[in-house]
Image: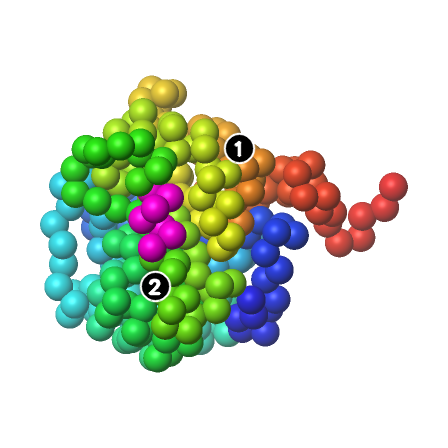
């Protein structure tokens, strides 16, 4: 895959997506509703080593109140425009499930759609029309599954990918995310993390978002801002399972985890490496 003049060869290394929440109600307390603060945070995340900047204007924390298109656009569009102007080669994703927001974000300079509601047909149409990669995340209302949770998540993501393929999106531009923490109990989350290779085996780029989430908090008994090491464990184990992209709050720390994990798992070496 190529974006902004950069080549992304899936399988050769792991990429890092930095979270930029332009919201007042982020679960982890990292939201920056003030536009200037969000812009500076995005640029700092890029400089810390992010490959993608994921900019979102609606919290998806448990119990969140959805916002309308106008409110979401008012939050994210000025940030995208400013980041694009100041860092022209930054690769930006818009964290939205609303087709109207995705179109507006693309016009402002966004490159990728990152949807927490899978791949609705209307969003696939936007990705096709604007030639944008689409990240589709598993999600559902409630935590009940008739059968095995990993079977259900895998089938859901396979359907998302097949529908996107049928509309002409190239496989390297269809990203699949198991949706840790969305419509799942903590035990469901751990089962999926244990069997991530099944998601990777679907044959599409994969995205993992575990950063600071409540399952890590329940295991470590730490507050969201203290869950860096717990998140790092899922980053390393996700890479061992074949994950291609990790979506995180703490860029510098996870960049180190990626570098060491990729060296072991994918035989990656930094530029200038000598024996």
On screen, residue 211 versus residue 144, left or right, reads right
| Disc 1 to disc 2, C-alpha distance | 29 Å
Q: Quadrant of residue 74?
A: bottom left
**Range shown magenta:** 153-159
Q: Which mark is residue 237?
A: 1
Q: Mark yes or no: residue 209 visible.
A: yes
Q: Mark yes or no: residue 79 visible.
A: no
Q: Residue 202, percent across and down? A: 47, 49
Colouring method of the image: rainbow
Which numbered disc flags the more N-terminal residue, 1 or 2? 2
- Tell me the quarter of the image containing the N terminus: bottom right
Q: Quadrant of residue 259?
A: top right
When the figure is inspected, residue 255 is found, relative to residue 78, above or below; the finding is above
On screen, residue 270 versus residue 61, left or right, reads right
When the figure is inspected, residue 257 is found, relative to residue 53, above or below; the finding is above
**Furthest residue in direction right, as rendered:** 275
Residue 144 falls within the magenta-colored stretch? no
Secondary structure character of the magenta stretch overall: helix
Question: In the rendered image, which residue does mark 2 sit on?
Answer: 163
Q: Which mark is residue 186?
A: none
On screen, residue 12 versus residue 224, left or right, reads right
Q: Residue 198, percent across and down? A: 47, 40
């Amino acid at each position: 895959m190529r974006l902004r003049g950069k080549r992304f060869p899936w399988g050769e290394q792991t990429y890092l997506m930095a979270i930029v929440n332009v919201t007042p109600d982020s679960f982890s307390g990292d939201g920056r509703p003030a536009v200037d603060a969000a812009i500076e945070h995005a640029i700092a995340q890029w400089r810390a080593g992010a490959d993608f900047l994921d900019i979102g204007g609606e919290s998806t924390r448990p119990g969140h109140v959805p916002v309308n298109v106008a409110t979401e656009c008012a939050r994210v569009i000025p940030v995208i425009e400013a980041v694009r102007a100041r860092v022209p080669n930054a690769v930006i994703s818009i964290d939205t499930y609303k087709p109207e927001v995705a179109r507006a974000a693309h016009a402002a300079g966004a490159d990728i759609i990152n949807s927490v509601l899978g791949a609705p047909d209307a969003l696939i149409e936007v990705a096709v029309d604007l030639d944008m990669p689409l990240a589709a995340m598993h999600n559902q209302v409630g935590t009940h599954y008739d059968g095995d949770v990993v079977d259900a998540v895998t089938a859901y993501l396979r359907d998302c990918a097949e529908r996107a393929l049928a509309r002409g999106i190239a496989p390297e531009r269809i990203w699949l995310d198991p949706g840790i923490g969305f419509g799942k109990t903590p035990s469901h989350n751990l089962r999926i993390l244990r069997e991530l290779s099944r998601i990777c085996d679907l044959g599409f780029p994969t995205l993992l978002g575990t950063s600071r989430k409540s399952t890590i908090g329940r295991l470590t008994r730490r507050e969201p801002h203290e869950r860096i090491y717990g998140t790092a464990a899922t980053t390393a184990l996700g890479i061992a399972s074949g994950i291609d992209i990790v979506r995180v709050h703490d860029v510098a720390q996870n960049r180190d985890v990626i570098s060491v994990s990729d060296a072991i798992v994918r035989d990656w070496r930094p530029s200038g490496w000598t024996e």
